[in-house]
Amino acid sequence: MLEGCISWPESVAARYRTEGYWTGEVLGDRPDDDAGRHARTAVITPDRTLTYGELDLAADRLAAGLRARGIAAGDRIVVQLPNGADMVVVCLALFRLGALPVFALPAHRAVEITHLVEASEAVAYVCADRVLDCDHRELARQVLVRTVGLAHVLVAGDPGPFTALADVDADPVPLSAPDPADVALFLLSGGTSGPPKLIPRTHADYTYQLRASARLCGVGRDSRYLCALPMGHNFALACPGVLGTLRAGGTAVLAPAPTPEECFPLIERASVTVTSLVPPLVPLWLEAAEWTDGDLSSLALLQVGGSRLDPATAKQVPDRLGCTLQQVYGMAEGLLNFTRPDDPEEVILHTQGRPLSPADELRVIREDGVDAAPGEVGELYTRGPYTLRGYYRAAERNRTRFTEDGYYRTGDLVRRTPAGDLEVVGRTNDVVNRGGEKVPCQEVEEHLLADPRIVAAAVVALPHPLMGEQTCACVVVRGGEPEPTLRQVQASLRERGVAAYKLPDRLVVLPRLPLTGVGKVDKRAVRDSLAG
Ligand code: OOB
C-alpha cells in the first residue's frame, strides 16, 4: 500500500477476500460480460451525451495523454471540476492510469487547495477555467506561489497560461491494472476539527461500497442517477452515486447545480430514477414540485443525507415528489447506513438507517466508556471492509481517532433502536454541520485570529431552521479597536482565500470568552450564553 497509509491487518484482509467483500475488481475496469454496453448511454449533461464506448475512449486517450506528460501510477492529482462530462472522464482516466485523484469541493479556494496540494504532494491540479465568480486559473496561480512540486495545471475550457485539458490527448496505450489492495483515491474528512485530513480509499474497498450500495438501492442497467450534489463528495460519487451507477451499467445524469431549476428539466428529459440531496435542499424541491409543470414521475428514490433531516419534511417527500425516501447516514471515512426502501414509515422518517454491510462492526460507547444498551446515547465506533484504518500521513490524529483494535471513532453521538437502526443525535467533535457542509471550528478560529483586531475567537454552532446549524463566531476585540462587523470579518476571511461555506453566518462580540478549569475556551458555556 502507498507509504503513509495504514492497511487492514492481513488476517482481516484475508477474511474480507474469502467472504467475497473484496474481489479482484478495480475502479475504472470494464465488465467483459456486457455485450450491449458499448452503445448504451453512460453520461448525460445539459449539453452532452456520451455512450459507454465514447466515455471509455475519452478516458483511455486522456490516460495516455497524462502518461505522455509524465504523470504516473501513484501520483496525486487534486481534482476540482464542476459536475459535467469532464469530471467523469478525468476520474476514469486517473483510475486506469493508477494516479490518485484528491477530490476537492467546488467551494474550496486558495487556502484549501494549497492545503490539499501540500498534504498530498500533488503533481497536478485539474480545474475548470471559471465557475460562477471564481477564476480557477487565478486560484491556481496563488496555489503555485504558495507550494512546491505542482508541475501541471490542467484546465477544462480556456486554459489561460496553463494547459488545456483537451490538449492532454494521445492514442490509447496498454496500462497495467492497479493492485486491488492499493489506494485508488483520496476523500476529505469532514468530521475532524483541523484542516481536512486525507482519507485513502482502496480499489477493493471502494468497488465493494459501489457494488453493495447499488444492490441495496436497486440500481442497475435501467437506472438513471442524477448527480445534483458535487460529484467529488462521497455521497454523490459512490453511495452508489455516479461511480456505482456506471459500474452497474446505468446512466449518470449530471446537473451543474442542485436547484430545482437545473434538476427538474433533467429529471424529465433523462427519466431520472434516483438522486441524492442534503436536507436544506429538500424543502426547496418540495415547494418547486408544487408549481412545476415538469414530469417527475420517473423518480423512484430520493436519498437524503449529510446532516439531520427534519421528520416533518421527510414525511412530505412521498406525496409531493412521488417517490420513496431513503435516509443515508454516511461518512467519507467509510461506514454507510441506509434506511431500506421497504422499511416501515416510522423507520424511514425517524432513523438514519442501518449499516450497508453484514461485515460492518459497530459499537456505541457511553461517556463512561461502557457499551450503550439499545436506546442509550453514545459515540459510534466502527470498523469494516470499507472503513479506513488511518488517515494519510497523520500519525498523531490516528492515535486519537482510532482504537488499538482498529475501530474508527466517528465523533457522532448516536442511539441504536432495538431493531438496530441508528439515530444521529449529536457530535463530540468541534465541527459545525451546515446542512451537510462541515465547518471545522478550529480552522476558522485560526483565520479569525489572523485579524489583528481579534484577540480571542470561539466558533460554535447555532440551530437554524433550514440549515440545521449555522456558524456563529464569538470574538473578543483588542482594547481600543472598533468592533468589526460581520461583513468585515467575512470579507477578511474571503480575502485570505477561505471557502465561502466556512465564513461565519453570525458574529457576536464578547468582553471575554468563558474558560474551563484548565483554561481552555468553554464552548458549552459559549453556546449556553448565546441560547440565553
Ligand atoms: C457525509 O459525509 P461527510 O464525510 O461529509 O460527513 C460525515 C458526517 C457524519 O460523521 C455525521 O456527523 C454527518 O456527517 N452526517 C449526518 C448524516 N449523514 C452524515 N448527520 C445526521 N444525519 C445524517 N443522515 O456527510 C455523507 C457521506 C456519504 C453519504 C451521505 C453523507
Image: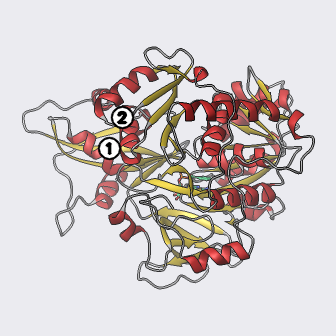
> Going by the picture, which residue comes out furthest to the front?
174
Ligand 1 is in which quadrant of the figure? bottom right
For residue 273, above or below residue 256: below
Residue 316 seen? yes
Q: Residue 203 has which mark?
A: none
Name the residue beneath numbered marker 1: 444
Q: Residues within 10 Å of mark 1 (few under 14, many from 20)?
A: many
SS for dot 1:
helix
Q: Residue at horizontal 66%, vertical 51%?
A: 177
Residue 64, percent across and down? 62, 33
> Which one is closest to the eye, mark 1 or mark 2?
2
In the structure shown, which secondary structural element does the residue marked by tag 2 occupy?
Answer: loop
Residue type, mark 2 in image: Val
Residue 278 seen from this side: no
Quarter of the rendering containing residue 115: top left
Q: Amino acid at mark 1?
A: Val
Q: Which mark is residue 498?
A: 2
Q: Are marks 1 and 2 in contact (CB under 8 Å)?
A: yes
